[in-house]
Image: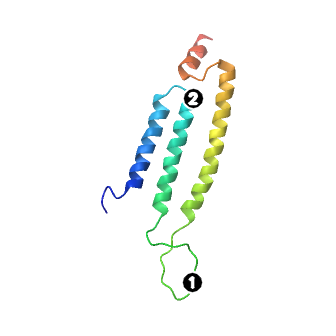
Amino acid sequence: MRLLGLYNYWVVIVLMMVGFYTIIARDNLVKKLIGLSIFQTSVFMLYISMGRIHGGTAPILMEGTDVVYSNPLPHVLILTAIVVGVATTAVGLSLVIRINEAYGTVEEDEIHSQDESL
């Protein structure tokens, strides 16, 4: 296998680093949630890429044939993870709205300075 032939893994690495950088470098809580969503998406892509078998078909048993089957379990688990990720993002956004109502800002530095002044 050539190194550049595994482009989907390179895409996963780039998305993971973009999401991780966004989480660490930004002070805006909404941007942090966007970075977390990008990071989650890269993990989903990684598991889907690993679950694929070249030449594999759906696991439908047929008599008299010698066929390579793909395992559908990683794809099913990712569907569950996508639902959990969307729910986590929704809860995070609702918390950001509540923080904005309480502090008047979504910038992390301003929230810390308001807490220290109390």
Image coordinates for residue 59, horizontal then vertical, percent: 56, 74
Secondary structure under the numbered disc 2 in the rendered image: helix
Q: Which residue is mark 1?
A: 62
- Distance from Cα at disc 1 to Cα at disc 2: 53 Å
Q: Which mark is residue 29?
A: 2
Residue beneath the point at 57% across and 29% down: 29
Image coordinates for residue 43, horizontal then vertical, percent: 50, 49
Residue beneath the point at 48% across and 39% down: 19
Q: Is residue 51 above or below residue 20?
A: below
The figure's colour scheme reads rainbow
Looking at the rendered structure, the kind of residue marked 2 is: Leu
- Going from N to C along the chain, the mark reached first, 1 or 2, is 2
Task: Look at the image and tell me in which quarter the C terminus lies.
Answer: top right
Residue beneath the point at 65% across and 18% down: 104
Q: Crowding at label 1, few (<14), some or many (≥20) Cα neighbours within 10 Å?
A: few
The residue lying furthest to the top in this view is 117
Q: Which mark is residue 22?
A: none
Q: Is residue 113 above or below residue 27?
A: above
Left/right placement of residue 69 relative to residue 89 reads: left
Circles 1 and 2, Cβ within 8 Å, touching? The answer is no
The residue lying furthest to the bottom in this view is 64
Residue beneath the point at 53% across and 19% down: 109
Number of marks drawn: 2
Looking at the rendered structure, the kind of residue marked 1 is: Met
Q: Crowding at label 2, few (<14), some or many (≥20) Cα neighbours within 10 Å?
A: many
Nearer to me, 74 or 57: 57
Q: Is residue 85 above or below residue 62?
A: above
Nearer to me, 46 or 116: 46
For residue 111, what is the image quadrant? top right
Image coordinates for residue 48, horizontal then vertical, percent: 50, 58
Task: Look at the image and tell me in which quarter the N terminus lies.
Answer: bottom left
Image coordinates for residue 45, horizontal then vertical, percent: 49, 53
